């Protein structure tokens, strides 16, 4: 059974040693908790897929401590430089061509000639990356298809019997996964909305393209049903019944639900993103028949929130 370890020099050293030895470690990032392993070790990367029970191999995000470390693995572009300078460390993942001398496991790329790289901001992730001295591949630390973990105890609930160590970094401040952008060309292509908004990227890069659904650039993991609670979900609710749990947003929540959790009573999208996954878990309980969700504005972080909600609602 997994142990949740307080962040100390000792526990970080223990986790770093485990990474170097080819084991998996759950680590906090500012977006969600990741299930990490040495990205240069095929067997270690395979162990991530085994623990998550992923039905097939999706490419994984590789975490590194800084831009210089990223440049060792992928072909850097002027666009990558612009975006990394603006948003790293932070919730942005760049998809770039693997360098011919790239040492990353081919399994992290799942057969593609690209790799997805990010520099997390969370101090504990930074410490672990530096102490382990390895790039760390890490998908969200949940079983495939389930809600991403934003607290250490979520990781234990989902993967407790499959992993040994969870580093405790507290609740994740951003709460939705990183934005995934293909930065191999001249214009950024948005593969997955996330913690950095489309508007932020457009401001820095001039414009943003959308990935075509099913197209070559489409992020493979986007095809999976994801983030699903076990109760069915109903979006854009304008009324609610006592048998429903209500995921509310804004100063005037609907009345009459069996249980209500407000993502942000002030209508703040960053606050809503940070509480989204924990709120979905809290409403996913016996005695309720469904989760009703009030409309969330689709600008800024609302795009990532609505993307996750749509996936959760479509899951069955
Ligand atoms: O915030 C996050 O991004 C978290 C934390 C732990 O860093 N990680 C995460 O990983 O969400 P995961 O495996 O759940 O999602 C990775 C996403 C998927 O949508 C996947 O398809 C995409 O990144 N991706 C990875 N490598 C790719 C590649 N070479 N080309 C296109 N998309 C890629
Ligand atoms: Mg995930």
Image (cartoon, grey):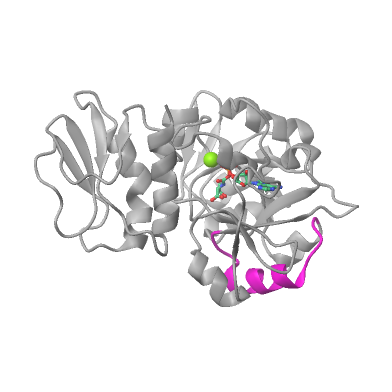
- Whole-percent x and y of residue 145? 49, 31
Nearest the eye: 62 or 191: 191
Q: Quadrant of residue 246?
A: top left
> Which residue sits at x=78%, y=34%?
42
Q: Is residue 256 above or below residue 62?
A: above
Chain part drawn in magenta? 73-91
Q: From the viewer's perspective, is 236 left or right of 86? A: left
* Residue 11, image x, y percentages: 55, 45
Camera-side residue: 265 or 131?
Answer: 265
Looking at the image, which residue sits at the far right? 100
Residue nearer the viewer, 4 or 32: 32
| Depicted 11 relative to depicted 250: above or below | above
Is residue 151 visible to the viewer in this orientation of the structure?
A: no
The quadrant in which the C terminus is found is: top left
Which residue lies at the image location 51% right of the left edge and 55% below the top edge? 193
The image shows residue 241, relative to residue 126, as above or below, that is above
Residue 209 located within the stretch drawn in magenta: no
Q: Residue at x 71, y 66 (%)?
A: 67
Query: Can residue 279 be seen in this snapshot?
Result: yes
- Count of labels in the image: 0
| Coordinates of residue 70 in the picture (x, y in percent) | 74, 60
Task: Report the residue at 71% width, 46% height from top.
Answer: 216
Residue 87 in the magenta stretch? The answer is yes
Q: Position of residue 117 (x, y in %)?
A: 68, 55
- Figure quadrant of residue 152: top left
Q: Specify whether 225 is left or right of 55.
A: left
Q: Is residue 206 left or right of residue 255?
A: right
């Amino acid at each position: 059974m997994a142990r949740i370890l307080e962040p100390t020099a000792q526990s970080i050293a223990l986790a770093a040693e485990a990474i170097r030895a080819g084991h998996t470690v759950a680590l906090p990032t500012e977006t969600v908790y990741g299930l990490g392993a040495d990205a240069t070790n095929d067997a270690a990367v395979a162990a991530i897929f085994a623990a998550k029970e992923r039905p097939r191999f999706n490419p994984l995000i590789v975490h590194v401590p800084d831009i210089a470390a990223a440049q060792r693995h992928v072909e850097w572009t002027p666009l990558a430089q612009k975006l990394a300078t603006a948003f790293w460390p932070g919730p942005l993942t760049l998809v770039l061509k693997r360098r011919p001398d790239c040492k990353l496991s081919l399994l992290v790329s799942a057969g593609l000639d690209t790799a997805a790289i990010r520099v997390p901001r969370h101090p504990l992730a930074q410490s672990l990356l530096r102490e382990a001295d390895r790039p760390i591949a890490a998908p969200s630390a949940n079983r495939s298809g389930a809600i991403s973990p934003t607290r250490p105890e979520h990781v234990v609930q989902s993967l407790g019997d499959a992993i040994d160590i969870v580093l405790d970094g507290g609740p994740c401040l951003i709460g939705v996964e990183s934005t995934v952008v293909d930065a191999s060309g001249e214009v950024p292509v948005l593969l997955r909305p996330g913690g950095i908004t489309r508007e932020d990227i457009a401001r820095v890069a001039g414009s943003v393209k959308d990935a075509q659904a099913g197209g070559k650039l489409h992020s493979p993991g986007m095809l999976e049903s994801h983030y699903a609670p076990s109760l069915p979900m109903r979006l854009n609710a304008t009324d609610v019944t006592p048998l429903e749990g209500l995921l509310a947003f804004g100063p005037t929540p609907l009345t009459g639900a069996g249980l209500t959790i407000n993502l942000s009573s002030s209508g703040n999208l960053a606050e809503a993103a940070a509480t989204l996954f924990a709120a979905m878990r809290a409403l996913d309980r016996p005695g309720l028949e469904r989760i009703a969700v009030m409309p969330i504005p689709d600008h800024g972080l609302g795009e990532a929130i609505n993307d996750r909600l749509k996936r959760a609602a479509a899951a069955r």
